[in-house]
Amino acid sequence: MRIIQVNSHFHGGGVDTQTLELCTGLLAQGHEVMLALNPGGRWESRARALPGLRIEIIDGGKLHWGLRLRRLAEQFQAQVLHAHHGRDYWTTGVAGKLAANKPQVVLTRHLMTPLSSTSARYLLWLGHVTAVSKAVQANLTRELKGDQRRLHLVYSGVDVQHFRPDAALRNQGRALHGWDETQLVFAVVGGAGLPDGKGQREFVEAGARLIREYPDARLMIVGEGGLIPVLEQRIAELGLQQSILCVGFTQDVERIAAMIDVLVHPAVGTEALGLVIWEAMAAAKPVIASRLGGIPETFIDPDHGRLVQPRSVDELYAAMKLFAEDPEMRRRAGTAAREFLITNEYTREGQARRFAALYQEIQPG
């Protein structure tokens, strides 16, 4: 098939990771794939490194995007236009409606936040809508007007060859901070926007309690945003600058996954799925995460980790302590977590197969 993936905000977030993984998986299946991007996207270089992927840069407002997508659809003879960000739904949908070759439109919802009233009314008219989790699907079922048969659940996936247990990468990552195997490393990976980020405040408070009992424990906060200076001030007040590190944004998430012992995802707002959870699980790491949105769909408590109440420092601390004091539990949970991903095909290949099947299903005739 000939497929155009659309992403006008390609700056390295979870949605962009899923877009890139989908392109890679579809190319491996033999499909022809084009990726339409905004200029200057942080991950453009990653996209250009993919053999066989056609890149189209579109610079301009929504009208220009819509007209250009329509032209690209016709020139490429695309059978599918697939958009991933809410800002691209209308330009992609209208381009599909206007293109002479009438490609099918797929709009993926990666968020739990409510749709606008206009989008809720017309998205199922614009195209087929996919949800990344049952939690998102339930929201959309309540919100969307129109033919609910055009709403589909399609899980994402991660590259389990890229994210894997890797002793060399683990040692390399730890050496950057002067750590060895005596340090027990917990990490939060995600945006740290104000006011709450991904629950990094609670992570710091729970971690500070843990460090009093386990002085060799280390916390990593991986990500960027306005909350970081607030966290750094709190860490300084606690006198834990040597134990709790804010390391900023990194494209090298596989190194983080390899070097840590436990991934913590204490989301406090809304969470559609939490792809970083699967990245850590692919590296055979147990997970502590909030019982929120689509997160409970990503792993089984207690087999692969622990679910905690959002904003509960007490529950977060208790879960972190549980894994701190039992290395065999960490090993068992991490091994089972990776097996769970592979068995359920929450992988790059699995995601590509699921979407390719949907693309075929919605073709006319």
Image (tube, grey):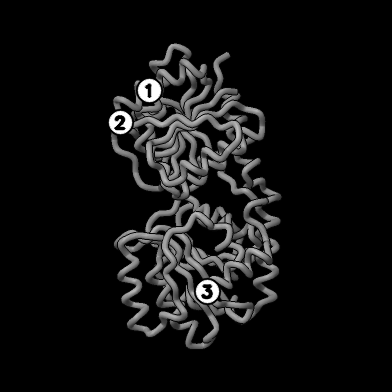
Amino acid type, callout 1: Arg
Using the image, determine if residue 58 lies above or below residue 159.
above
Q: Is residue 156 left or right of residue 222?
A: right
Q: Which residue is mark 3?
A: 177
Q: Residues within 10 Å of mark 3 (few under 14, many from 20)?
A: few
Of callouts 2 and 1, which one flags the residue occurring earlier in the amino acid sequence? 2
Secondary-structure class at tag 2: loop
| CA distance for labels 2 and 1 | 10 Å
Residue pictured at 34% horizontal, 63% vertical:
196
Of callouts 3 and 2, which one flags the residue occurring earlier in the amino acid sequence? 2
Quarter of the image that includes the C terminus: top right
Using the image, determine if residue 80 lies above or below residue 10.
above
Residue pictured at 57% horizontal, 77% vertical:
179
Q: Which residue is mark 1?
A: 68
Q: Which mark is residue 60?
A: 2
Quarter of the image that includes the N terminus: top right
| CA distance for labels 3 and 2 | 42 Å
Q: Is label 2 in contact with label 1 (beta carbons under 8 Å)?
A: yes
Q: Is residue 256 left or right of residue 119?
A: right
Q: Quadrant of residue 284?
A: bottom right
